[in-house]
């Protein structure tokens, strides 16, 4: 591989910018988290839009609400941004998300928050050059791995671009803003679930309670998991807590919905601990874990049962090249 | 392996499978699970992300990017691989080592010691004696890099996890939950009841080799020594 001829300098960091890829460290058995992009669908869209031949092997950036301001040194770079509504601004001009653009030499790219959504992804053709630690370049914050593998971006960090670029700054720039995704606008977001390991052991009243449209995404929401606030399950059936309190710890699947004794569900995401022992009544489907990564605190949400077949279809659809369309409303 | 434990494979949502081995929990099931998980990590099935053994079950996570993981055939494929691993594996996991871990019980180091004493009807001293007076086996590593799940806790110390997990547990905290005890290998959030604190370093992020970054292995033995009794 030739010497990188382009590199971005972090002029100012965003709120929480992480290097991510989709390669596994395969180290759950040592206690490492899975890590990687929370909204896999958006991460891959950004890579494809940037013209990256292998977005599933390249490193990109995940950012929360407001991304970093970057200055490009060297040759022009083809890039794209996808995810929750973000406004990429190149040399002062707003660009469209979900569209490729070319950052010219010396170009200043700002990633400003839109009105909806939570996480954005910046991909460049060829991906960023970041050292791989134990098979992945994804930041692992719970483990505190060294440098960019263990922390968000800081001012002065350098992100080199992997492939020599042959772009010219005269490539067409699409300045049309895309419509906000309707699911982020208002109302209640349906999140599809399958039964979790302890679902059959819970009393009917607790199961019914979990499926009611009375939850909101709390501010305790990060890459480890998202806590929902809502009324606790009926006290009359509080026995289930004792019965299930002594469960042996087991591997937590991504999207596992835990129910701690205080009765507020927590959906576990990529930075979860690999083993846990709280009751797991539900299991969120992969496609809706990615949608959940874009839902801001305060949003009304409802768990809605689905089938595994429907979950696989939803996953294929979410990994297709089109931005997601629409969201289902709850409480029908 | 002379007797193959009963192998069952079930879906966990749409992107993970769980192999359970009966009878669980048992040492046979735990070592069979470990054997299967190691085999799968060495020779992953198509689309597999990772395989994790814990207490006689193996969680196998699957990549949404692999077409082969959408469909019932993934389950039967895994089932066949798990049975094959038990038939062909030599069944001998590495001999466990024994570690002595000094613990400062109670006070700021063990904020839940008094509560545990109250809830179990024991004195704080009795809780310490019963916690430290056993040889524990590392049943699993998980939660955070190097965090050992140790069993079995004295039956009189079995308590549910905290109703609301703490947002910050200091590194080295020695804690209990259900029939298990463990040591927080990094500072993190956590719902276990904290009895004390140890200075042992269980995670070395600077290690070149991934497997060497973590101090304990499944099968190792751990003995807690109350710090005032420890001789250095």
Image (cartoon, coloured by chain):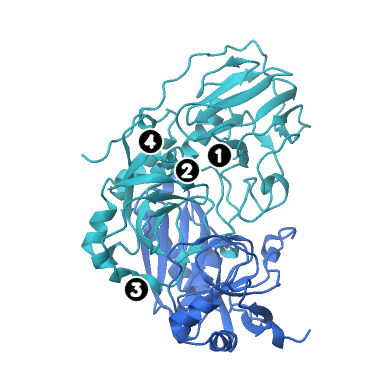
Instruction: Identify the element where label 4 is drawn.
Output: helix
User: Chain letter for cyan?
Assistant: A
From mark 4 to mark 2, how far is it between C-alphas?
12 Å
From mark 2 to mark 1, how far is it between C-alphas?
8 Å
Q: Chain of mark 4?
A: A
Q: Earlier in the sequence, mark 3 or mark 4?
A: 3
Say which residue label 1 marks.
A56
Does A30 sit left or right of B65 as displayed? right
Question: Which class describes the residues within 10 Å of circle 2: few (<14), some (14-19), or many (20+)?
Answer: some
Query: Which quadrant does the C terminus of chain B fall into?
Result: bottom right
Instruction: Identify the element where label 2 is drawn.
Output: loop
Q: Chain of mark 3?
A: A
Say which residue label 3 marks.
A242
Say which residue label 2 marks.
B65
Give yes or no for contact between labels 4 and 2 (Cβ–Cβ under 8 Å).
no
| Above or below for B49 versus B138 | above
Question: Which mark is drawn over residue A317?
Answer: 4
Inspect this view and state whether residue B110 appears. Answer: yes
Give yes or no for contact between labels 2 and 1 (Cβ–Cβ under 8 Å).
yes
């Amino acid at each position: 591989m030739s010497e990188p001829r382009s590199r971005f300098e972090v002029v100012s960091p965003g709120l929480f910018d992480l290097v991510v890829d989709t390669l596994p460290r395969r180290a759950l058995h040592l206690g490492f988290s899975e890590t990687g992009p929370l909204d896999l669908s958006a991460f891959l869209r950004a890579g494809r839009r940037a013209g990256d031949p292998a977005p599933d092997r390249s490193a990109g950036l995940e950012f929360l609400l407001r991304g970093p301001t970057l200055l490009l040194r060297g040759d022009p770079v083809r890039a794209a941004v996808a995810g929750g509504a973000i406004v990429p601004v190149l040399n002062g001009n707003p660009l469209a998300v979900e569209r490729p653009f070319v950052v010219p030499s010396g170009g200043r790219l700002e990633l400003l928050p839109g009105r909806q959504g939570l996480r954005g992804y910046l991909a460049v053709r060829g991906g960023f050059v970041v050292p791989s630690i134990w098979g992945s370049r994804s930041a692992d914050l719970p483990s505190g791995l060294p440098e960019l593998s263990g922390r968000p971006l800081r001012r002065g960090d350098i992100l080199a671009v992997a492939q020599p670029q042959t772009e010219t700054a005269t490539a067409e720039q699409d300045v049309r803003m895309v419509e906000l995704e309707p699911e982020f606008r208002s109302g209640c977001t349906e999140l599809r679930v399958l039964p979790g390991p302890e679902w059959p052991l819970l009393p009917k009243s607790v199961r019914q309670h979990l499926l009611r449209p009375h939850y909101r995404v709390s501010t305790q929401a990060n890459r480890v998991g998202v806590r929902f606030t809502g009324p606790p399950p009926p006290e009359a059936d509080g026995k289930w807590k004792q019965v299930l309190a002594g469960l042996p710890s087991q591997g937590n699947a991504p999207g596992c919905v835990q129910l701690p004794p205080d009765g507020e569900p927590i959906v576990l995401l990529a930075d979860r601990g690999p083993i846990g022992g709280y009751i797991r009544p539900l299991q969120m489907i992969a496609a809706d874990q990615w949608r959940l990564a874009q839902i801001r605190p305060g949003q009304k949400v409802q768990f809605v049962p689905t089938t595994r077949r429907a979950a696989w279809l939803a996953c294929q659809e979410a990994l297709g090249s089109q931005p997601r369309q629409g969201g289902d409303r709850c409480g029908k | 392996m002379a007797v193959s434990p009963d192998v069952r494979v079930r879906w966990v949502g749409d992107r993970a499978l769980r192999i359970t081995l009966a009878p669980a929990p048992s040492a046979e099931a735990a070592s069979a699970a470990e054997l299967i998980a190691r085999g799968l990590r060495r020779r992953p099935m198509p689309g597999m992300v990772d395989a994790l053994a814990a207490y006689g079950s193996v969680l196998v996570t699957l990549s949404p990017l692999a077409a082969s993981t959408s469909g019932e055939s993934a389950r039967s494929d895994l089932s066949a691989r798990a049975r094959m691993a038990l038939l062909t594996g030599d069944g001998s996991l590495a001999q466990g080592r024994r570690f002595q871990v000094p613990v400062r019980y109670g006070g700021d180091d063990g904020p839940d010691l008094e509560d545990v004493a109250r809830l179990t009807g024991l004195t704080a001293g009795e809780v310490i004696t019963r916690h430290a007076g056993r040889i524990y086996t590392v049943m699993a590593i998980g939660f955070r890099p190097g965090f050992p799940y140790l069993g079995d806790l004295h039956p009189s110390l079995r308590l549910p996890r905290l109703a609301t997990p703490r947002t910050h547990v200091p590194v080295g905290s020695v804690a209990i939950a259900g029939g298990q005890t463990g040591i927080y290998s990094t500072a993190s959030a956590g719902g276990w009841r904290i009895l004390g604190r140890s200075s042992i370093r269980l995670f070395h992020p600077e290690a070149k080799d991934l497997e060497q970054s973590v101090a304990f292995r499944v099968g190792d033995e751990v003995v807690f020594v109350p710090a005032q009794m420890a001789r250095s």
